[in-house]
């Protein structure tokens, strides 16, 4: 007897003229219904405020960045046990000395900037002599609008990490932010808007969901929005989506600069520039001042000169010069051409210095 699903095949044997003849026949057999699929277990309850703090604080570092007499405080998120940390670019921009304190261990670490993306306000750091640090859980996708979130940060720079609850208000916001240190303004796109108030010192800290999973990087408090959304008294803060931030982290880990991401030490020309406009001047990057002993100083650049080519490429604005500069590393020899206020053209090769993240 042979069985097939849903029926039974019978083989009938008869004798005829000395031959055996088989005649198939089928009989339908009802099979039992499949067992019901097991019900999905209910989601675990959200963490309490105390559990959320106990879960998140160990993966946070507080950051102090200074340049001369000025300094900035901020926050960072531990990504690897050996000390890879994610923070905002504006926390470390221009700093010549950076240290970080692990909340988990209380130890102070010297900090190296591995790479950054100034347009997305992100920087990837490494803590010297770090090991066995707790690592932050990272979300694979962003939660929906209305999700309860909590911002953790070194609020007001006091060295104590504070938790501020709120919720996600909207995604894909474009905003203009002002740097509290120098007053400069920057445009950020694709931001997560929350009503968890973010204060100075919180920058670079984790925005986590109800289970302590990082969904964003705290970046700015109440700022100017580019859309026409009415403004009320509700706290207004913005975070870089963690999915976008991790794409920058992966590029920095690859070791390859590209687009707006710079990897490795920052090259320094040693001159402050502004886009040259009108007055019969050549388009380019006009020198406002030159740092003594810098590559620009050694090349003979002076106030009022206009850089017109760099590394063989035309320069028509400050953005052109910055982009071309960031393609290089300290120690690179680069051709530069400029025009003086008297209209004289000069060119030479400069060897770039090692400078702070910009």
Image (cartoon, rainbow, N blue to C red):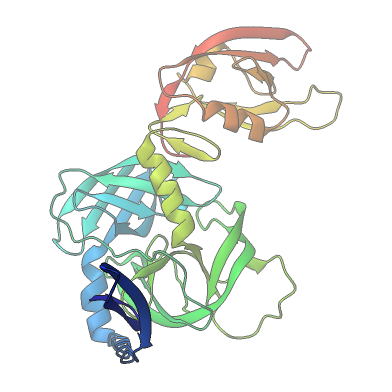
Residue 188 point in image, percent of width and height: 60, 57
Measured as percent of width and height from the top left, residue 69 is found at 38, 46
- Residue 336 visible at all: yes
Left or right: 78 in relation to 282: left
The residue sitting at 84% across, 31% down in the picture is 278
Q: In percent of the image, x 70 and y 32: which residue is there?
A: 317
Q: Is residue 272 above or below residue 199?
A: above
Farthest-out residue, front: 17
Task: For the N terminus, give its image quadrant.
Answer: bottom left
* Above or below, 202 relative to 133: below
Residue 337, by quadrant, is top right
Q: How many marks can you see?
A: 0
Residue 231 in the figure: left or right of residue 353: right
In-front residue for pair 293/96? 96
Q: 285 or 305: which is nearer to us? A: 285
192 lies left or right of 284: left
Q: Residue 253's spot in the image, x, y percent?
A: 35, 40
Residue 255 drawn at (x, y percent): 38, 34
Q: Is residue 89 visible?
A: no
């Amino acid at each position: 007897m042979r069985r097939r699903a849903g029926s039974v095949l019978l083989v009938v044997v008869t004798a005829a003229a000395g031959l055996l003849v088989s005649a198939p026949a089928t009989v339908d057999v009802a099979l039992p219904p499949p067992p019901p699929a097991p019900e999905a277990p209910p989601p675990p309850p959200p963490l309490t405020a105390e559990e959320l703090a106990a879960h998140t604080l160990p993966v946070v570092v507080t950051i102090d960045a200074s340049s001369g007499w000025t300094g900035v405080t901020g926050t960072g998120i531990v990504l690897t046990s050996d000390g890879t940390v994610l923070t905002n670019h504006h926390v470390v921009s221009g700093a010549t000395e950076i240290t970080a304190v692990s909340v988990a261990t209380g130890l102070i670490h010297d900090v190296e900037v591995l790479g950054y993306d100034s347009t997305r306000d992100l920087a990837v750091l490494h803590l010297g002599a770090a090991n066995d640090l707790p690592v932050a859980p990272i979300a694979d996708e962003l939660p929906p609008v209305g999700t309860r979130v909590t911002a953790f940060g070194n609020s007001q720079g006091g060295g104590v990490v504070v938790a501020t609850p709120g919720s996600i208000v909207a995604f894909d916001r474009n905003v203009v932010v002002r740097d509290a240190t120098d007053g400069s303004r920057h445009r950020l796109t694709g931001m997560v808007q929350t009503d968890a108030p973010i204060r100075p010192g919180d920058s670079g800290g984790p925005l986590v969901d109800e289970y302590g999973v990082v969904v964003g990087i705290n970046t700015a408090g109440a700022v100017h929005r580019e859309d026409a959304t009415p403004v009320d008294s509700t706290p207004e803060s913005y975070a870089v989506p963690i999915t976008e931030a991790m794409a920058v982290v992966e590029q920095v880990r690859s070791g390859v600069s590209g687009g707006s991401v710079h990897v490795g030490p920052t090259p320094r020309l040693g001159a402050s520039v502004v886009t040259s406009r009108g007055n019969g001047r050549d388009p380019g990057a006009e020198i406002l001042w030159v740092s003594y002993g810098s590559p620009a100083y050694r090349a003979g650049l002076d106030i009022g000169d206009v850089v017109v080519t760099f590394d063989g490429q035309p320069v028509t604005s400050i953005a052109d010069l910055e982009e071309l500069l960031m393609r290089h590393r300290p120690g690179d020899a680069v051709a530069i051409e400029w025009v003086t206020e008297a209209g004289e053209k000069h060119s030479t090769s400069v060897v770039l210095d090692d400078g702070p993240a910009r």
